[in-house]
Image (cartoon, rainbow, N blue to C red):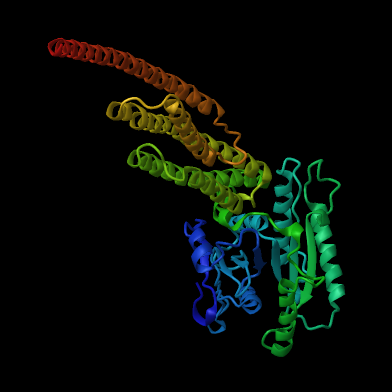
Amino acid sequence: MLVKNNIYSCHQIIDENQNLSDDLSTAIKQQWELSEAKLDYHVVSIFGSQSTGKSTLLNTLFETSFDVMDASQGRSQTTRGIWMSRAKQLPILLMDIEVADGAERGEDQNFERKAALFALATSEVVIFNLCENQVNLYAGGNMSMLKMVIQVNLELFQNQKGARQEKTLILIVIRDYIGQTPIEKLKKNLQDSFDTIWNELNKTPNTITTTIHDFFDFMFIGLPHKILSSDQFDKETDNLQLRFIDQTSSDYVFQPQYHKQIPIDGYHKYVSDIWTQIRMNKSLDLPTQQELLSQFRCNEILNDILAQLEEMTNKLKTCALEEDGIIEDLGNRMSTFQKTAIKKYQTSASCYLPEFYEEKEKYLLSILNTRFYALYETQLKNLHIKAIEKFNHQLKTMIFESQSSCGCRAEGYAKEIIASSKKTVEDYFENNAKELLLPGAGWSCKSEFARLKTTLEMLSENARCYDTKKFNEYCERNKEELREKREMILKIACTALVTAAYVAEKLL
């Protein structure tokens, strides 16, 4: 959702009381329109002394609308807590972080340490806004802040239980740079300071041989004074902006090794869990947090699909009651739902850790096959019953009732009717049963088909016996009728002979 001048709105994700916003997920989806980003997004945070133009720099580089200091009101703190926004036309989330060297918080750096840990755990690039006159001041506010960031990153690594260490890019922006001292000289001075900071840190045995470059990559750029050298400032900020945009540039900042690999739909859950651990001063194990997030989101996606499966199967059961047990086009309905469900799961969950994603995908397939197999078996049984009903109806119509109304048929007629009726219902069953089979499910209708054929043969034998009995009864009835007719004919013949003899005698 764009606001004035097509600029995305800002959202306070952590307030001055250290509470994380419940609406971050809504902001990501609705305000910043990133719901479909998956892993195609980046996170940048910025640190620096109060009123040195951190928010102004973000607004200039990314066309955001973070609050900036009103110089006429004095050098007061404008950023409280942590604010976030999205870069205009780019899938980049920006975090503007409160610092500790202002009068508002005094000497309390507890929040700043937590904010530094939060930024390192969630950001690919951390911008340090550093004035040129502070470069050689090792005890200056920004250098002590940088020392704190390096310290908490080391602590973060030491809690990783041997997992791969993700690097973070630290982009040092030297503000109010006048050009008198070459940037390379300032860069060397800063790197010497970083090495000094690193060497002074307490390390565990597994980090004693590491260097600061195992954890961080560094970039340096000088920016002239925004007001006194505005034209040069604009030119250099344009050059700096290209580092966030031009993927072909050797200075492009968003390299794969910096990405935290947190899918955007799980970002709120992830940062919420991270902040909870930080706020409670618990050891932060990022791989474990990523595993928990993957497990949570894969389960959430899976449960959403299973809820749709439950709704579908309930509808199919209703259809079965309304359609006399046989669900029309059941095989196609099951196959379509299975394909849609698997595709939806893969689309939504494939960005999470493979071991959890693949495990839940197998489980989903298992559940789908189990639920659909129950429908398949019920449909087979109902097809069996329907086939028997069809067979009995045909026999009743074409044999039993026809014999009652038309007398005896020619020999072999019933046999032909039975064979034809059997083939009709067997084809009916087999064709409908094959339509139910899901690809790769390993189902078979052979046993149910064999039971049907056994039942049909038994009914056929009964029909043949009935037909033979009726034929024999017909023959017996026919024999009696012939005997009675013969006797009648003989009686008539005898009477005629007696009459003829009497007439002849009279004539003589």
Residue 299: % across, % down: 54, 43
Residue 96: % across, % down: 60, 67
Q: Nearer the viewer, residue 410 or 105?
A: 410
Q: Residue furthest left?
A: 506
Q: Nearer the viewer, residue 143 or 10?
A: 10
Residue 244: % across, % down: 71, 72
The residue depicted at 72 percent of the width and 81 percent of the height is: 238
The residue depicted at 55 percent of the width and 62 percent of the height is: 35
Asked whether the viewer can see residue 274, the reply is no
Relative to 73, 261 lies left or right: right
Q: How many marks?
A: 0
The residue depicted at 42 percent of the width and 20 percent of the height is: 464
The residue depicted at 60 percent of the width and 62 percent of the height is: 37
Q: Is residue 337 above or below residue 424?
A: below
Residue 217: % across, % down: 79, 61
Quadrant in which the C terminus is drawn: top left
